[in-house]
Amino acid sequence: MRYEISEVVKKDRVMELVFGNCSKPRDLLGRHFILQGQVISAYHPDAVKMEVISEDGEHYPMDTVERQPVFSLFLPHKRPFSYQIHMTFHDGNTYISSDPYSYEGLITEEEEKLFSKGNWTEVYHKMGCHKVKIGNTEGMYFAVWAPGARRVSVVGDFNYWNGMLYPMHKMENSDIFELFIPGLSCGQFYKFEIKNVQGDIIQMVDPYAVMNEEKENGASRMFDLGRFRWEDSRWLSKRYHGNVFKTPMSVCEVRISELDSPDEKVQEIVQDMGHTHILLRGTPERAKLGVERGFFEPTFYGNTPDTMRFFVNRSHKRNIGVMLEISPEYLTRAVHLFEKKHPQAVNYLLANILFWIKEYHIDGFVFRGLSENSSDFLEKAKEVIKKEDNSVLFIGEEIKGKQTRDFFDFEWNMELKAGVEEYLGTDFEKRQGKYFCLSQPLMKGDFSNTLLLLNKEKNNLFDESLIDKKPSCDYDKLTGVRMSYGYLMGVPGRKAWDLHSHENISSQEYVKSLIRIYQEYPALYEYDPLRASFEWINGMDAESSVLRFMRKSSSGRDNLLFICNFGTEEKENCQVGVPKAGKYTMISNSDAVEFGGEGRDEHQEVQAVSECWDLRPYSIKISVPPLATLIFKF
């Protein structure tokens, strides 16, 4: 071995490489400039011959080192030039490729320091797998954090999953391993092979992978996030400059498993109903298969990042926001990492949240299944979200022992929902005793910053099992559903509707009319912490089973009066106290024929008289159909 080569190619480094223990292969392989010129080295366990081919076509034979499949070449000049390695194998086959170890890493020293401290929030731009172009060469850049690893390699269908090829280079001041491999392209599969200090070897999917195989123990897949072109700048500007507490918000829940094709059916339904947001829920079946491994991988139809981005982009162009549900399983894994208080793990989690905001333009995050020990992580997550974009929503449920009302932008209203479920789940003859399950939760405070879910899951308040089915009942069992929808639209807070909670055509039309009223009347969505928009008229009339309340606007105009008959008998000449004289015009009747009702008292317009009732100076008299909600404006 020439003296000049021995300055770079040390025997101990060669042995580390050959025996699969090399953590810094770039110290040995690639191009190295020395005082006398430059040394180029390459390695392949099956090679018997190598030569360097320069950009001008010159061939330079390489010599073996220490009788190992490590080959080196000394050139007595320092002129940089592009080159490839021509390899000949035992079976006579040959292969020409660019040298991965001739390229420097892409992670800067400053980024490495930020990562070590847990402050590199845009770490996803370089960690994982990314399509890049260095000079005139295209390929894939890989980076992974592997603390305590003796050796990390990129393996895949492009190198027969052989960990002896493409060992990654460990950075100087961290446990980040990186490598650029020329010639690789999107669609190819890969994993990281890790050899620990005990000598055990495992292969793992990329924790930053944006796409994985949809099977047990599947590999990660190379993908280029940079090729997608967003067209939603108008929506993002509107969101950023808007105020969600002063504008209507109606959320439609959609399971990702229902988005099995790229057509616009779901978005057309959501837009036609008047919903402002789509909430994408996860797929339990995928979680059971063990597919949801990565925090950066979208679970979407087609299982590609661009199909989800296409969906979000198209939703925004239709003026529909898109929010993501954070599943309890995801949150449990996140909290487990967060509690380790390892800066790199915390960095990984917080960067992941920003990733969904920046790379997928997500408008909000919804958390369910929260445990007491999740509060610290959620508090830090919210801090990061709001610092990046204060218009991104943060929605969750109450955490036992924690004051969360001011923590989330909107909090799930579980108490009110439970009260209505208990009431409607009781036999009619016993419901009078459950009357205060309806009104009592609303007497405990302001629910304006809450989110109430109206869905059709088993044992939910709109499951048909909770609507009385006795043969003696001659009314439509959906009447009670419409009455409940009207009542719950009137109580404070935003509403989340399941995509299938109103599949019946008449009920669907009723819900559509309620959402239209909700968007038309600020009294239903305006939030002012200094002014109560909800006021009881009478929430104590258990004998009649009728609830009466008002929703008031900040302008004093277009206030709304809700009268909800939870009983099965029509209330003729029902007297209701009102705050002022004048005309009260009905704008909604859940018993209307167009909604599947019997059309009783559809066209009422009443004049308030100066007769005190319900501790109000004026009152009106109306007939209220059984199981019906009437809405008047005044």
Image: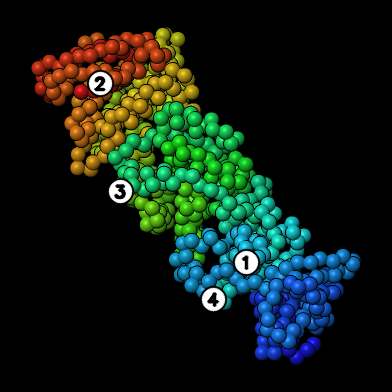
Residue 26 lies left or right of residue 455; in this view the side is right
Q: What element carries label 3?
A: loop
Compute the Cα span from label 2 to label 1. Answer: 67 Å
The quadrant of the picture occupied by the C terminus is top left
Q: What residue type is labelled 1?
A: Ile
Q: What residue type is labelled 3?
A: Asp
Q: Residue at x 84, y 66 (%)?
A: 94
Q: Which of marks 2 and 1 is in front?
A: 1
Q: Is mark 2 on a helix, strand or loop?
A: strand
Compute the Cα span from label 3 to label 4. Answer: 41 Å
State the scheme by which the image is colored. rainbow
> Mark 4, residues whose alpha carbon is within 10 Å: few (<14), some, or many (≥20)?
few
**Badge 4 or badge 2: first in the primary sequence:** 4
- Can residue 470 be seen here? yes
Point out residue 395 in the picture as x, y percentages from the top left corner: 39, 45
**Badge 3 or badge 1: first in the primary sequence:** 1
**Badge 3 or badge 2: first in the primary sequence:** 3
Residue highlighted by disc 1: 134
Q: Which residue is drawn at 51% across and 62% down?
A: 123
Q: Which residue is drawn at 41% across and 46% down?
A: 236
- Can residue 277 be seen here? no
> Mark 3, residues whose alpha carbon is within 10 Å: few (<14), some, or many (≥20)?
few
Q: What residue type is labelled 4?
A: Asn
Residue 147 lies left or right of residue 557; in this view the side is right
Residue 328 lies left or right of residue 188; in this view the side is left
**Badge 4 or badge 1: first in the primary sequence:** 1
Q: Which of marks 3 and 4 is in front?
A: 4
Q: Nearer the viewer, mark 3 or mark 1?
A: 1
Residue highlighted by disc 3: 406
Residue highlighted by disc 4: 173
